[in-house]
Amino acid sequence: MRSLINILDLSTQDIEELITVANDIIANPEKYREKCRYKKLATLFYEPSTRTRLSFESAMLELGGSVIGFSEANSSSSAKGESVADTAKTVSCYADIIAMRHPKEGAPLVASQNASIPVINAGDGGHNHPTQTLADLLTIYREKGGFDNLTLGFCGDLKFGRTVHSLISAMSRYKGIKVVLISPEELKLPSYIKKDVLKKNNIPYTQTTSLENAIADLDILYMTRVQRERFFNEEDYLRLKDSYILEPGKLRNAKPDLAIMHPLPRVNEISVAIDSDPRACYFKQVLYGKYMRMALILKLLGEAEK
Ligand code: NCD
């Protein structure tokens, strides 16, 4: 594998290997400080980001490499009309690896077909976000000790939430997984994912609009933000944005070892009063995301085995 566009580009064994490397980085950071010396990461971000871009940049810097790139489309030649394919060919002359975020589904795939260096999808429209999934998987692994026999609840914008799409795909390969889809009618999981991922892998799933009714069964609660930037009109967004707000009272029936996750940024979906609950894992996800991106960069640059 040369690029990471969809989480399924990685086998479950690849994911295990990345987790092993990430855990080793956490335990022995000094071993990795020079691994990517003289290597350059290009971050091509055509859409806003705080965590993902800074996480990639910190990952490369902590490996001893350096970083070039842009953080808004307006400051790149795409504002002059340059295609993603041409930008990918150009950046291949400057860098060793690319992380690309783009509002259009499929743009990082096009980049990977035109670049001569590995391309990592850092989020494409409402489609996929495989490196957030790597962060999520390390969090689940460290919280739960593995991936089998878990009941996962996904709550919020399941239609446009690309992190949800990628995590469901990744989890569909493990044993004894059950999925509870909690969303307003208008923001249900797209039917292509139900068909191609959940049904195809015989994953039992239920759909509900009520978080309260679902919470008691869950091992993982994955909250998401309503994706304002993907709505066609503001009125719909305003009507749906506060559909779910997790407050301490709503955890009354939750398991004592529930893991509460969120890819962030949060808007109102999780009250700050939850942050001090030991079940809140969302800031751990941020940290683990950096370690998994370090492990991924090492793998794609062929530095992992050295
Ligand atoms: C997510 C994304 O960009 O899809 N953020 C992230 O990368 N951690 C989630 C979101 O924006 O809601």
Image (spheres, rainbow, N blue to C red):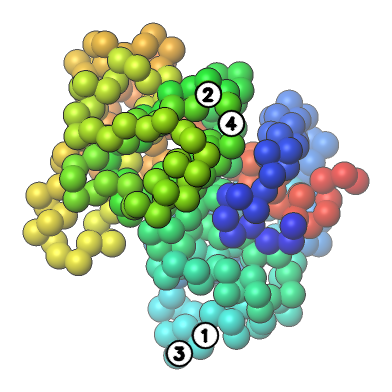
The 10 Å Cα crowd at callout 1, few under 14, some 14 to 19, many 20 or more, is some
Q: Position of residue 190 (x, y in %)?
A: 34, 52
Report the number of discs.
4
Q: Nearer the observer, disc 2 or disc 3? A: 2
In space, the residues marked 3 and 1 are separated at their CA atoms by: 6 Å
Q: Are marks 4 and 2 in contact (CB under 8 Å)?
A: yes
Q: Which callout, 3 or 4, points at the residue further toward the start of the chain?
A: 3
Q: Nearer the observer, disc 3 or disc 4? A: 4
Above or below: residue 279 compared with residue 193: above
Disc 2 element: loop
The 10 Å Cα crowd at callout 2, few under 14, some 14 to 19, many 20 or more, is some
Q: Position of residue 268 (x, y in %)?
A: 22, 38
Q: Which label was assigned to residue 176?
A: 2
Q: Which residue is mark 3?
A: 81
Q: Position of residue 45 (x, y in %)?
A: 49, 66
Q: Amino acid at mark 1?
A: Ser
Q: Are marks 3 and 1 in contact (CB under 8 Å)?
A: yes
In space, the residues marked 3 and 4 are separated at their CA atoms by: 43 Å
Q: Which residue is mark 4?
A: 174
Q: Residue shown at 24%/57% (left/top)?
A: 228
The 10 Å Cα crowd at callout 4, few under 14, some 14 to 19, many 20 or more, is some
Q: Position of residue 140 (x, y in %)?
A: 54, 27
In space, the residues marked 1 and 2 are separated at their CA atoms by: 44 Å
Q: Which residue is mark 1?
A: 83
> Is residue 270 found left or right of 2 in the rendered image?
left
The 10 Å Cα crowd at callout 3, few under 14, some 14 to 19, many 20 or more, is few
Q: Nearer the observer, disc 1 or disc 2? A: 2
Q: Which callout, 1 or 2, points at the residue further toward the start of the chain?
A: 1
Q: Amino acid at mark 4?
A: Tyr
Q: Amino acid at mark 3?
A: Gly
Disc 4 element: loop
